[in-house]
Amino acid sequence: MAAMDFKYIIDTFFMLFSMVLIIFMVPGFAMLEAGLVRTKNVTAVLTTNVMIYAVASTAFLLVGYELAFGTWVKVEYSMWAAFLFQMAFVGKTINIMSGGVSERVRMIPLAIFAVVMGGVIYPLAVNISWGADFLKGTALDIHAMHDLAGSSVIHSTGGWALLAAILIIGSRKGRYKNDLIKVIPASNIPLVVLGGLLLWIGWFGFNGGSVGSISSKEMADSVALTILNTNTAGLAGAIVAGVIMYVRYRLFDITMILNGALGGLVAITAGADLFDIYTPILIGTIGGALVVFAIPLFDKFRLDDPVGALSVHLVNGIWGTVAVGIFVDKISLLDQLKGVAVIAVFTFSVSYMVLYSINKLVPFRAEDDMQLQGMDVVECGVEAYPEFKRAI
């Protein structure tokens, strides 16, 4: 077998394997969200996650990929593997948004937005950062930003879209009354843990696969370092979230520990390939702490986010991108800040306009009596736990 054929086969297999790991994040998001919402909304959340994967991926196949990259990218492995790897990312942006508006969002308008996100908004965010770069040569060109696997391009993009959605859709019925915040407990902690750990495993393909090759000693070392740093940041985020919760409340909150881990994973995503093996401890520690403090802060502003997606993905997407400029000498902090700002303005403004327009035609928010009954019954006709008395 020729050396070039061997390299082609190994890198193609590596990209396909990484894609499969990323797709494991689909059930990861589904289980995490299903465990965090009330039993009367579990089927709706699961249906939404399956729908998003199908709709957003199809939109990316038909329109989004070429909009992002200008053409079918020429790589030193199978072009079909290159597409599948990029396609695996697209659903994550809308997964972030859908989880944060769960328990009061209707499926049809969300599906329409998933088409726009998968076919236009996310591909344009990729275009100006990793892809064809229609802003090249302008003052808004952000190709100099280093964002390995999308702390900003994926996680902040999903987070900004979620913020726009929450502002338009509003909070769940009864969540905020006067100056009080009603605590709505998770319905299934085992599902939350399963979902969080599936996401953690998926991140190894998310970041490791973004290195792009494993067929040489140097690239294999780079992939291994990237995965090591990814895991380290997750560990640090989980530990610091657990410690802070115990110091403040003398309790270990597994939902916050997992969100701390996810915050660390989001934060390391921008530069996992560039750091030494110790810096991710600091980045993940800050990421986990940011989650713990940001969740109640968003509640104070009455931004109702049942799964903590704003704190995990938006806040740590920003922190992770900025951290590369702080801790890596060869990367400009100004370039990182510019990338954060351009992604923020573009994604939030376009998402808000699209969401506002869809909402005028087909309202996103379920009516109060529909929320009271539960989205499983009114949207799906199938309850996840029919033998149990549903909480209202």
Image: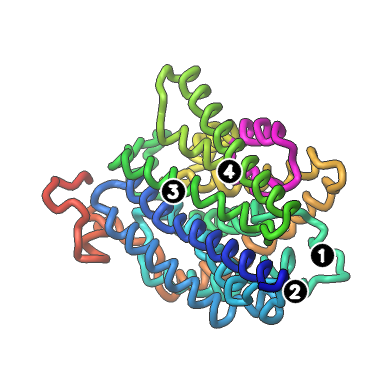
Callout 2 amino acid = Ala
The answer for how far apart the CA atoms under marks 1 and 2 are is 11 Å
Residue 280 at x, y = what percent? 67, 36
The answer for how far apart the CA atoms under marks 1 and 3 are is 35 Å
Residue 373 at x, y = what percent? 21, 55
Q: Under tag 3, what secondary structure?
A: helix
Near mark 2 (Cα within 10 A), the count class, few <14, some 14-19 or many ≥20, is some
Q: Is residue 389 above or below residue 363?
A: above
Which of marks 3 and 1 precedes in the sequence? 1
Q: Quick one: which residue is furthest to the front in this view?
A: 1
Q: Under tag 1, what secondary structure?
A: loop
Residue to which mark 4 is pinned: 265
Q: Which mark is residue 198?
A: 3
Residue to which mark 1 is pinned: 141
Residue at the (74%, 41%) spot, across then down: 275
> Looking at the figure, which quarter contains the N terminus?
bottom right
Which of marks 2 and 1 precedes in the sequence? 2
Residue at the (59%, 61%) spot, across then down: 14
Residue to which mark 2 is pinned: 132
Q: Which residues are magenta?
A: 264-287
In this view, the mark in front (1 or 4): 4
The answer for how far apart the CA atoms under marks 3 and 2 are is 32 Å
Q: Is residue 114 above or below residue 24?
A: below
Q: Under tag 2, what secondary structure?
A: loop
Residue 267 shown in magenta: yes
Tag 4 near tag 2, CB within 8 Å: no
In this view, the mark in front (4 or 3): 3
The answer for how far apart the CA atoms under marks 1 and 4 are is 27 Å
The answer to whether residue 129 of the structure is visible from this angle is yes
Residue at the (33%, 44%) spot, across then down: 191
Callout 4 amino acid = Leu
